Image (cartoon, rainbow, N blue to C red):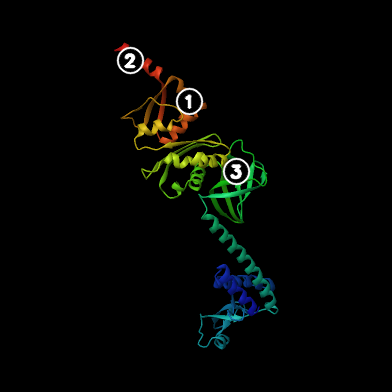
């Protein structure tokens, strides 16, 4: 080994952030393994490899114990021989005796290259992981590469991400070259590198899209209070304005509906209900049941769970409940209240029955 190797190590430290001393130590450990391949070696012995930080030369030493009478030449050294190497050595001391094999320089250079290559790969993997770990819970633009066994593999710049089946929007068709926005749900460091799981169904995908499209949200003027999503079909999002002069619904919809239209287009024409949030649960629940009209919201006080009864016009009952109960389910998720929806005639019938009993 030579000064070129030392220069290479110093360059890796400055450009790649790989600690030079860590590299030296790794090379020394690798040289010990190389030594054992060219020498018969007693596992009971201790071997040390030392790399000169200036020249790059590597020398190997066997650590021997100083004794009065030598019985094992590999493990022991006489006092006289020890003092020639280490003046003042006494019985019981440990002395390093050089035993560098011939042609060790060539072996050392090859070993050093292998170690540096390996550490460089590890460092690059670590840098890639760190870069993408910071992107977890964020929105990225992905390009579909291929679809295999139901999994969609996408390009995310330096790395490939995967959209598992459960993170795919039902009915959305993925073809190579297709560009789409994805939510980074998990960045995981594994033995062979970094794996990234991305989602098209996560509710936070909707939040990130609104943050991207609506400046008032990005600026913190309009706040997203809650999101409930049935991916591929419908989303409800509750918003609130910190500025009384800014209409949160208008800000999210945008001029001529352009802002929300861009988001709907990105998520395969999924319907979005933008709801005005209120700290008053009666108002909030009534708003959340949109597009249905609401006549009355009764909060059931004293219940251990938050329950509310909602009265709607007879001709709005199906709309309020929604197809397969979707509107009611999303409203309950959005507000955090268990909701019982009744038509006006159902309520009047119950009241009449109660009055007749009394």
Instruction: Give the mark nearest the N terminus, 2 or 1.
Output: 1
Q: Quadrant of residue 287?
A: top left
User: Do residues under tags 1 and 3 come within 8 Å of each other at their CB atoms?
Assistant: no
**Residue 9 in view (yes/no):** yes
Q: CA distance from mark 2 to mark 3?
A: 53 Å
The image position of residue 124, as x and y in percent, is 59, 62
Q: Quadrant of residue 68?
A: bottom right
Label placed on residue 354: 2
* Element marked by disc 1: helix
Q: Residues within 10 Å of mark 3 (few under 14, many from 20)?
A: some
Q: Nearer the viewer, residue 133 or 228?
A: 228
Instruction: Give the mark nearest the N terminus, 1 or 3.
Output: 3
The image position of residue 162, as x and y in percent, is 61, 47
* Element marked by disc 2: helix
Q: Is residue 337 above or below residue 79?
A: above
**Residue 39 in view (yes/no):** no
Q: Residue at the location (42% across, 25% down)?
A: 341
Label placed on residue 319: 1
Q: Residue at the location (64% across, 39% down)?
A: 173
Judged by depth in the image, the label closer to the viewer, 1 or 3, is 1
Judged by depth in the image, the label closer to the viewer, 2 or 1, is 1
Instruction: Give the mark nearest the N terminus, 2 or 3.
Output: 3
Q: Residues within 10 Å of mark 1 (few under 14, many from 20)?
A: some
Q: Nearer the viewer, residue 215 or 297?
A: 215
Q: As drawn, is 349 to the left or to the right of 50?
A: left
Which residue in the protein does label 3 denote? 164
């Amino acid at each position: 080994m030579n000064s070129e190797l030392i220069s290479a190590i110093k360059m890796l430290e400055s450009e790649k952030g790989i600690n030079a001393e860590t590299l030296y130590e790794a090379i020394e450990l690798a040289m010990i393994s190389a030594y054992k391949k060219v020498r018969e070696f007693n596992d009971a012995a201790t071997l040390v490899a030392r790399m000169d930080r200036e020249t790059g030369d590597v020398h190997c030493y066997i650590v021997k114990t100083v004794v009065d009478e030598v019985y094992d030449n590999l493990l022991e050294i006489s006092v006289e021989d020890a003092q020639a190497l280490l003046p003042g050595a006494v019985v019981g001391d440990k002395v390093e005796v050089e035993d560098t094999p011939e042609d060790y320089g060539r072996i050392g250079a090859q070993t050093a290259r292998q170690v540096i290559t390996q550490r460089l790969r590890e460092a690059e993997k670590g840098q890639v992981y760190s870069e993408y770990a910071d992107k977890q819970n964020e929105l990225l633009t992905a390009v579909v590469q291929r679809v295999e066994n139901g999994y969609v593999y996408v390009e995310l710049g330096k790395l490939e991400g995967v959209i598992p089946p459960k993170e795919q929007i039902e009915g959305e068709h993925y073809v190579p070259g297709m560009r789409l926005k994805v939510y980074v749900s998990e960045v995981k460091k594994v033995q062979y590198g970094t794996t990234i799981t991305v989602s098209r169904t996560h509710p936070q995908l909707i939040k990130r899209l609104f943050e991207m499209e609506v400046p008032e949200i990005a600026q913190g003027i309009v706040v997203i209070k809650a999101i409930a999503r049935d991916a591929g079909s419908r989303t409800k999002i509750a918003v609130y304005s910190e500025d009384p002069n800014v209409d949160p619904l208008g800000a999210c919809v945008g001029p001529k509906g352009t802002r929300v239209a861009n988001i709907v287009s990105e998520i395969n024409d999924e319907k979005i209900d933008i709801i005005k949030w209120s700290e008053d649960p009666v108002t909030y629940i009534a708003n959340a049941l949109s597009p249905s009209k609401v006549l009355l919201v009764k909060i059931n006080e004293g219940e251990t769970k938050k329950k509310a009864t909602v009265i709607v016009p007879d001709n709005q009952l199906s709309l309020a409940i929604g197809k397969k109960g979707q509107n009611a389910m999303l409203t309950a998720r959005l507000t955090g209240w268990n909701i019982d929806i009744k038509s006006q005639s159902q309520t009047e019938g119950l009241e009449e029955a109660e009055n007749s009993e009394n």
